[in-house]
Amino acid sequence: MSTGSRSYLEALHDDHIASCGQCLRGGREEKGFESEAVDAAAAAFAAMTPATQGAVVAALVKLMRPSQLRCLAATVARITRVDFISSLSPELSLRVLQYLDAKSLCRAAQVAHTWGRLADDDLIWHRMCEQHIDKKCKTCGWGLPIIRNSGRRASPVPPPQQLAIPPSSTETSTTTSTAGTKRKRLDSDPTDNSSSSANQVSPSQLPSPVQSQSSTTIPKRRLWKNIYAERLIVERNWRKPQFRASRFIGHTDGIMSMQFNDCKQRFVTGGHDNIIRVWDAETNKCIKELTGHTQGVSGVQFDDQIIISCSLDRTVRIWSMKTFEMIRTFDNFRDGVVCLHFVDELLATGCADATIRIINLHTGKFFHLRGHTDWVNKVQIYKKEYLFSCSDDRSVRMWDIATKTVVREFVGHHDQVQSLSISLPVPRSARASIESLGGSPKLVTGSTDKFVKVWDIETGKCLHTLYGHEDGVMCVASDTLRVVSGSHDDTVIVWDLESGKRIHSMEMAGQSRGNTVDGGATGGVINCVQLSDTKVLTGGEDGVISVYDFYPDDLFE
């Protein structure tokens, strides 16, 4: 080795760097160290004025080698480091930590015990939940689902009875005219089964109704951090996507209508087989069959007390949710009843004769809203003052129930409008405004022109036109974060409500990410779709119910 190289290595060895143990101990054990000179320089520096001290420091910095500067920087950083969280009062520390996002809070909790105790405080995470749950945060752009039955321990749903579907049910043409299909159902003889033989499954293939067993559990208090984490995991599953999918036969013929209540873990379906079925959403088992309609059950809705159903047999029936007995029948309709929606005592129905009927369930009195010129496919009451309707006449209308007039018409679809849904934030207090909960309510519509549209209810302006389906859109559902649409093309697409961007397609996601669906892809038109915070349910023309659950199996393991 050359002399120059040895001199360089020796010089490097004499320098004190930040990782040098001798440096960290002050360097007094190093060879050639002059302690007296250091003490004299320190005493002289202490006797100087602040201005002179600054000038001396500046001069010394200029004379230092790079390695010495690194050593100095590490020393200064260590000396000037201040634990301001531990120094401040808990109230001020919490105030400071409230400005951090969730990831930064988790990192702060790992700094020290004091930091961890404050960063995990319920007050901070409650505020974090308020910023994100059921609406999008204005800072980070993320929104988290409510999960109304939060805290449930997710367990794998037992696979329902595996049932064979006749080949004919998976070969249904997806290009059949919607109007033709509906007319065929309406005009057929209730006692003639030939019109639905192509899609029928024998009753022996259906799972027999079973009584669900419920057990009472004492709810435990949950930390807000755990609540936030649970919802964050579910939201990430929505975006990946990652879900558990199950598929089972629900009716012997096509499913026309469905409603799902995540809180009660129940869903109700109505089919072309004239039957209403009540299901346990945890086990996917049928609890009860309700019979009485003589044609397809085109609409169902339930609450704690009753189930209301409508049918192409020109009747609306009310059933007890507890005893499942029929309570009342409205049978004075002129044509088939296509859809219904009720809020408290107010019931709205849409009919094949292009009329909308508003019924008071307490008194039985009713009146009509007239204006559509073809089938009314969907109605929804809004604030008990207004009603939205869509029709085969390509129109979407907003009605004032009190004055029986059209307030606004939403123009933009070029074919039959099959479905609509209102995305409305859920108030957490009586003083909460719509704007404070994530903006104005939005209307979502789906049409056989293959498009899904998102509208501003207050202005009637079309905010987004969602492209993605290759055939007519038969059904839509929405919440404050997402839109889900089902189509003739046998696809279910999940969209972001605010941006209008396509998040993923359920079938495509299942094939590309290893999510399996029992029995393969559905074999026909998707007639109805339901959306909750953790699930998507669909009902098809082949009588098959598909359930996509985004709640993870091992969340609490």
Image (tube, rainbow, N blue to C red):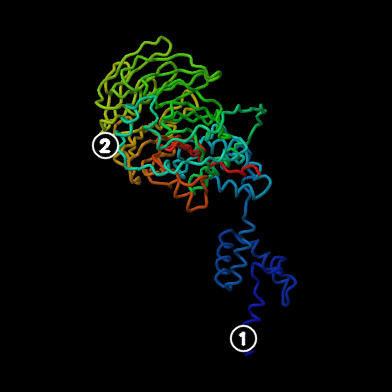
Q: Which residue is mark 2?
A: 415
Is disc 1 placed on a helix, strand or loop?
helix
Point out residue 414 in the picture as x, y percentages from the top left corner. Answer: 25, 38
Which amino acid is tagged 1?
A: Ser
> How dense is the environment of label 2, judged by Cα within 10 Å: few (below 14), some, or many (20 and up)?
some
| Residue depicted at x 65% and y 29% | 219
| Residue depicted at x 27% and y 24% | 407
Give the residue at the far right of this rendering: 29
Quadrant of the drawing holding the N terminus = bottom right
Disc number for residue 163 = none
- Inter-mark Cα distance, 2 to 1: 84 Å
Closest to the observer, 548 or 552: 548
Which amino acid is tagged 2?
A: Asp
Q: Is residue 364 above or below residue 410?
A: above
Contact check, label 2 and label 1, Cβ < 8 Å: no
Quadrant of the drawing holding the C terminus = top right
Which is in the foreground here, disc 2 or disc 1? 2
Mark found first going from the N terminus, 2 or 1: 1
Res 340 seen here: no
Q: Is residue 305 above or below residue 468?
A: above
Q: Which residue is mark 1?
A: 5
| Residue depicted at x 52% and y 43% | 245
